[in-house]
């Protein structure tokens, strides 16, 4: 990989790659790009205006699957 790329750069690259794959009808490739994005930054939360509803839906599905498989669960703090 390019040592000059930041984690934020990599997240953006995978986000745009997934969006392009999905727009081209390649949902498996899009899912793999989202999986890679989540491996890099598991807590990534895109803005609601960052993509189409179809892209957001697939990302949400991949995020939920990633969190189940890797034990990342967000909940309200308990006191």
Image: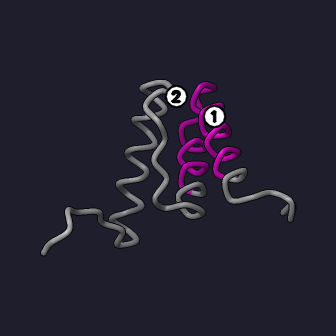
Q: Which mark is residue 51?
A: 2
Task: Using residue 79 as the reference point, say whether residue 68 is left or right of it.
Answer: right
Per the picture, the main secondary structure of the magenta-coloured stretch is helix
Residue in front for this viewpoint, 19 or 3: 3
Q: Is residue 56 magenta?
A: no
Magenta segment boundaries in residue numbering: 11-35
Front position in the image: 65 or 37: 37
In the image, 53: left or right of 76? right
Q: CA distance from mark 1 to mark 2?
A: 13 Å
Which percent across, then down, holds residue 50?
53, 31
Disc 2 secondary structure class: loop
| Above/below status of 68 relative to 62 | below
Disc number lying in front (1 or 2): 2
Residue matched to label 1: 21
Q: Residue at x 60, y 33 (%)?
A: 19
Q: Quadrant of residue 68?
A: bottom left
Q: Is residue 38 left or right of residue 67?
A: right
Graded by Cα atoms within 10 Å as few (under 14), some (14 to 19) or many (20 or more), the crowding at tag 2 reads some
Q: Give coordinates of residue 58: x percent, y percent.
A: 44, 39
Residue 76 placed where, x, y %? 20, 62
On the image, the x and y values in percent for residue 27 come to: 54, 37
In the rendered image, which quarter contains the N terminus? bottom right
């Amino acid at each position: 990989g390019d040592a000059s790329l930041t984690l934020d750069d990599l997240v953006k690259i995978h986000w745009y790659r997934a969006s392009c794959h999905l727009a081209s009808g390649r949902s498996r490739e899009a899912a793999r790009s989202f999986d890679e994005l989540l491996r890099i930054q598991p807590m990534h939360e895109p803005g609601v205006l960052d993509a189409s509803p179809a892209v957001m839906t697939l990302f949400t599905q991949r995020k939920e699957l990633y969190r189940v498989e890797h034990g990342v669960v967000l909940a309200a703090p308990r006191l």
